[in-house]
Image (cartoon, grey):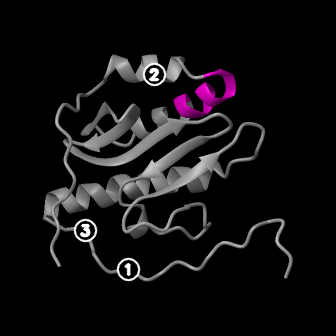
Amino acid sequence: MKAELLRFDGAVKRDPAIDAWIEGRPGELRDIARHWFQVMRSCGDEVRELLHDGCPVACLGDAPFWYVNAFKSHVNVGFFQGAALPDPDRLLEGNGKRMRHMKLRPGTATNEAAVTRLIKAAYDDIKSRVEHGLVIREERTPRPAKVAENSRE
C-alpha cells in the first residue's frame, strides 16, 4: 500500500524559536536537548527545522525525520520513520506504525555512538524516501518486546 510522506510547511535553515525553546528547558535537560539537536543539525546542508506541536523538529526540506522533546525527568529523541530504522542496540521505544523514540535521562550513560548512528540512519532514510520517491512501508516485522530491567524471569 502506498502512503504519502508526512510534510510540514514552514521549515527553515535555522529557526531562532528552536534555540529559545532549548534555552527554556531546565539545566541538564537543556544540555541533552541542545547536544542532540546540534548533532542533528550537522547531518547535512538540506536539514531544515521548525517547531511543531511545541517541540523542535528536523526536516529534509519539508519532510520531518527527527524531533526532540523535554519532559520532567527525561528528553525524548524521536524518529518519524523510526520503525524502519536499524536498531541493533535496541535503543528505540514505541510500537506504533512508524514513529519511535528513546528516552535520555540526566545522570544516565548514553550510548553516544549508537544514538548518532540512529540520527544518521534517519537522515539517510528520509533522504532516500524524498529523492527516490520511496513511500512509507505499511507492513513491518514486529519488534521483540523489551524486558524490564527489574522484571523477574
Give me the residue at 36% from left, 19% from top: 17
Closer to us: 95 or 130:
95
State the predominant SS element of the stretch in magenta: helix
Label 3 element class: loop
Which residue lies at the image location 84% right of the left edge and 66% below the top edge? 150
Alpha carbons under labels 2 and 1: distance apart: 34 Å
Numbered tag placed on residue 120 in the rendering: none
| Label 2 crowd (10 A; few <14 / some 14-19 / many >=20) | some
Q: Are marks 2 and 1 in contact (CB under 8 Å)?
A: no
Badge 1 vs badge 3, beta-carbon distance below 8 Å = no
Classify 21 as above or below 111. Answer: above
Highlighted magenta segment, given as a residue range: 26-34
91 is higher (above) or lower (below) than 41 = below
Disc 2 marks which residue? 21
Q: Position of residue 147 (x, y in %)?
A: 72, 73
Q: From the image, tell me which residue sits under label 3.
A: 136
Residue type pointed to by label 2: Trp
Q: Is residue 66 magenta?
A: no
Classify residue 118 as left or right of residue 103: left
Q: 6 above or below 36? A: below
